[in-house]
Image (tube, rainbow, N blue to C red):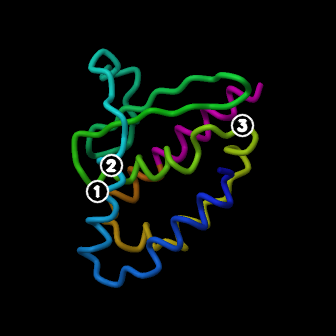
């Protein structure tokens, strides 16, 4: 599935959600779908700096595409990083580098987050974009 199709799917899912509590439940459901994160990867080197919660992000570059794996110690933050992993895993570094962040506004993700969680979201996005930039060189 390409990035546009993934974004469209997220919009369809979040469009019907009006209640803020239901929105958080949906976000947390994405976190529950993440594969188990290896315990040995929960190291400082893999932490996303700038997040209030602990967030770990690893990646592999195979066959010209980046594959991300992530985890967090809190349910909402885990859901947020899971959405980013869903959007950007298995894309080329160029696709990730050029990806617009408009999807985050379309699904009103930033609107319903505290300023601290928004800062964490920004840190996650920056980390993934940096990885893509490095892999592209």
- At x 27%, y 55%, the residue is 76
Q: Residue at x 40, y 20 (%)?
A: 45
Mark positioned earlier in the residue sequence (3 or 2)? 2
* Label 3 SS: loop
Residue that label 2 marks: 31
State the CA–CA distance, disc 3 to disc 2. Answer: 23 Å
Residue at (35% x, 46% y) in the render: 33
Which comes sooner in the sequence, label 3 or label 1?
1
Task: Please say whether residue 115 is one of the residues in the magenta stretch.
Answer: no
How far separated are the C-alphas under marks 2 and 1? 5 Å
Q: Position of residue 90 (x, y in %)?
A: 62, 37
Tell me where residue 69 appears, x and y as whole percent.
44, 32
Q: Within the image, what quadrant is residue 61 found in?
A: top right
Q: Which residue is mark 1?
A: 28
Q: In this rendering, is residue 62 above or below 88?
A: above
Secondary structure at numbered mark 2: helix
Image quadrant where one finds the C terminus: top right
Q: Which mark is residue 73?
A: none
Q: Residue at x 28, y 46 (%)?
A: 52
Q: Is residue 53 above or below residue 28?
A: above
Question: For the magenta stretch, what is the residue range?
Answer: 123-137
Q: Position of residue 1 (x, y in %)?
A: 65, 50
- Please report contact status of discs 2 and 1: CB closer than 8 Å, yes or no: yes
For disc 3, the marked residue is 92
């Amino acid at each position: 599935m390409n990035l546009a199709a993934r974004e469209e799917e997220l919009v369809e899912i979040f469009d019907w959600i009006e209640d803020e509590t239901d929105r958080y439940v949906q976000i947390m459901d994405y976190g529950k779908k993440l594969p188990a994160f290896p315990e040995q990867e929960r190291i400082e080197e893999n932490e996303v700096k700038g997040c209030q919660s602990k967030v770990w992000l690893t990646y592999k570059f195979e066959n010209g595409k980046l594959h991300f794996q992530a985890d967090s110690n809190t349910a909402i933050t885990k859901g947020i990083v899971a959405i980013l992993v869903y959007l950007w895993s298995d894309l080329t570094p160029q696709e990730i580098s050029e990806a617009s962040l408009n999807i985050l506004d379309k699904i009103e993700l930033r609107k319903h987050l505290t300023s601290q969680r928004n800062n964490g979201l920004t840190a996650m996005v920056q980390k993934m974009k940096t990885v893509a930039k490095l892999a592209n060189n």
